[in-house]
Amino acid sequence: MDTSVKQSPEPPAPAAAAPPAAAYRNLLLATVGFALTFWAWNLIAPMSGDYKDRLGLSSFQQSFLVAVPVIVGSLGRIPVGALTDKYGAKLMFPLVSALTVVPVLLLIPAKNSYGAMLAVGFLLGLGGTTFAIGVPLVNAWFPPARRGFALGVFGMGMGGVALSGYFTPRIAKHGDNLPFLVVAGALVVYALVAAVLVSDHPGRKIPTDTLAHRLGEAGKLRVTWELSALYAIGFGGIVAFGVYLPTYLKTWYEMSPTEAGTKAAGFALVTVVFRPIGGWLSDRAHPALVTSAALLLAALMAIVQAFEPPLDPVGTIALLAMAAGLGTASGSVFALVSQVTPQPKVGSVTGIVGAMGGLGGFVP
């Protein structure tokens, strides 16, 4: 006779609680702020041809002018991320947005002097730092099971660069100074809205040690540099293609500047769309696996493109698949950041990883 006691099956684990409405409000505000400040950050690049003609610049001088805000913005994420850990996004988002208005407006009187443009470009780098503000904000508001997708949605704010590339020259047709006035006005409105509506998570832990100590502690984490290497490949690849792809298409496929610009915009759009997909996949599989698969796809497509296939259809398919891989990897890397980084250090680690991603685009 069987005297064993049958155990009832364990109840299923409760599903993760849905994020509160405040989480989605902050995600929306962070994404909009990220896009607007990135538009400001990229104001010089779409107008660089005009500056070259106006100031009689060499190709190197033109490229250096475009690179200055990108490099400064990338490096600036390191202290801004650490400051966000300390003071919170409720202060940092409106503050950085409002301060970015200053160099945007200074582009108007500086346009006739190369030295002045370099100085303003240095200040304009501030607009590229908001990435390190938004990641810890979004990370704090969303539970682990949903952080990947939420961070991917926030990452779509990098489409502000594409907005700048498309709208800035078109707005400039109605007045040389109009793009700067439009962007400055949008930043002022956003800063006011963010000051009222952005809110830090009630459970946010505020570090008490110094900025230098927090950055040092983040730098001691092995995972910081592992993630930096991955992001330098993923996002750095996106930056590099954004800079180089139009020239590549014009040189190797003899496309007109308009056609090359349209193709490059398509590449940028695919990277933006696939970033939240990378985060979404990372909520369902390990982010490291998603990142590896995405970078493998990008590498295989790069090999295909190295043989200079006909653009229609093989080259186009290879470039778009490469964009999908890089966009997916960019989203999955920050899902990994949210999993392996202690919450009080997310801003500091994000700043370092984000900086390496931006600088990765300038590695030959």
Image (cartoon, helix red, strand yellow):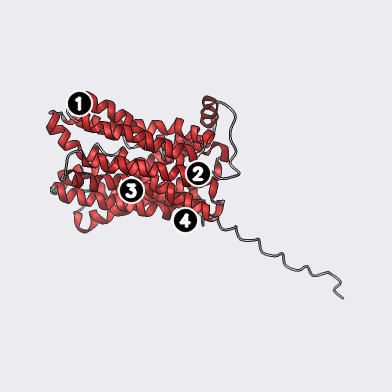
Q: Earlier in the sequence, mark 4 or mark 2?
A: 2
Residue drawn 15% across the image and 36% down it: 50
Mark 1: amino acid: Tyr
Residue hosting label 2 = 137
Q: In which image quadrant can residue 233 be found?
A: top left
Residue hosting label 3 = 159
Callout 4 secondary element: helix
Q: Which of marks 3 and 1 is nearer the N terminus?
A: 1
Residue hosting label 1 = 114
Mark 3: amino acid: Gly
Mark 4: amino acid: Leu
Q: Which of marks 2 and 1 is nearer the N terminus?
A: 1
Residue 26 in percent (x, y) is at 48, 49
Mark 2: amino acid: Leu
Residue drawn 17% across the image and 39% down it: 176
Residue drawn 26% across the image and 49% down it: 305
Mark 3–mark 1 distance (CA, rounded to whole Å): 28 Å
Callout 2 secondary element: helix
Callout 3 secondary element: helix
Q: In which image quadrant can residue 42 be found?
A: top left
Residue hosting label 4 = 281
Q: In which image quadrant can residue 182 be found?
A: top left
Mark 4–mark 3 distance (CA, rounded to whole Å): 20 Å
Crowding at dot 4, Cα within 10 Å, few <14 / some 14-19 / many 20+, comes out as many
Which of pointers 3 and 2 indicates the residue nearer the eye? 2
